[in-house]
Amino acid sequence: MKIDVLTLFPEMFHALDHSIVGRAKTLGQVEMSFLNFRDFSTNKHHKVDDYPYGGGAGMLLTPQPIFDAFHSLEAKSPRVILTTPTGKPFNQRMAEEWAKEEHLVFLCGHYEGFDQRIHDELATDEVSIGDFVLTGGELATMVMIDATVRLIPDVLGDQASHEDDSFSTGLLEYPHYTRPADFRGLTVPEVLLSGNHARIEAWRREQSLERTYRRRPDLLEHVELTDVDKKFLQS
Ligand code: 6GU
């Protein structure tokens, strides 16, 4: 996969040189480039923003530097993701779809956002990472790159490790425990030590259901519940 990021702060993206995304870069499973669109400004002071027509607070990113930076990319038919708090909320489904793409381009917003012509002419997707306002789209872009790259086949060593992820099943994940079985009197639920795989599976399903019911009841609307699930939730 190729990922191009248009940003005023390319240095921020060194965070992606670490951990699983860093390894994917080293192994050549994903290739990333970070382009500072300020370098494309034809303004003598390299200005990239201007006042909004009609008045109002704040400055807007002006079209010229972003259009020219975008058109400098070798982009056949990329998905172009514009970061904005007014976008569609990012979720695991989108990460799964994006992980299948050959080329992603991220446009990182700043100030009060982009001139609308950038949205209209360049973006294929307008995305937010949640109901809060960030100072810029860089951290949001890193969040989305991380969530997407780990789903590229072979990036996670053990393929099974994301099939059970929270949200992949539609429910939140159940609690996990590792050794020791007794840590300073804090013990692991007995069922997990039982070796009884049917009991363990049933316990995990119940824990997922209960956690989802308490923390994210909105998710339960979209999950196929078995009769056993429904009986448990009514208990
Ligand atoms: Cl994608 N950008 C900005 N600036 N703020 C956000 C966001 C994105 N998602 C949530 N808040």
Image (cartoon, rainbow, N blue to C red):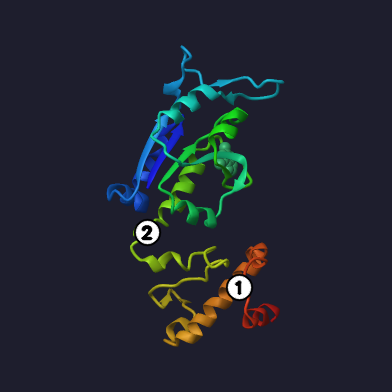
Residue visible at 46% across and 25% down in the picture: 68
Ligand 1 quadrant assignment: top right
Q: Report x, y in % for residue 232.
A: 65, 81
**Furthest residue toward front:** 76
Q: How many marks?
A: 2
230 or 70: nearer the eye?
70
Q: Is residue 135 left or right of residue 183?
A: right
Q: Is the residue at mark 1 in contact range of ligand 1, meaning its CB lies under 8 Å from it?
A: no
- The residue type indicated by label 2 comes to Pro
Q: CA distance from mark 1 to mark 2?
A: 28 Å
**Furthest residue toward left:** 27
Q: Which residue is mark 1?
A: 209
Q: Is residue 169 above or below residue 51?
A: below
Q: Report x, y in % for residue 209.
A: 60, 73
- Is residue 133 shown to the viewer in this render? no
Q: Quadrant of residue 193?
A: bottom left
Q: Is residue 216 above or below residue 203?
A: above
Q: Residues within 10 Å of mark 1 (few under 14, many from 20)?
A: many
Label 2: element kind: loop
- The residue type indicated by label 1 comes to Leu
109 or 117: nearer the eye?
117
Q: State which tag comes first along the sequence, 1 or 2.
A: 2
Q: Report x, y in % for residue 231.
A: 67, 82
Q: Which residue is mark 2?
A: 153
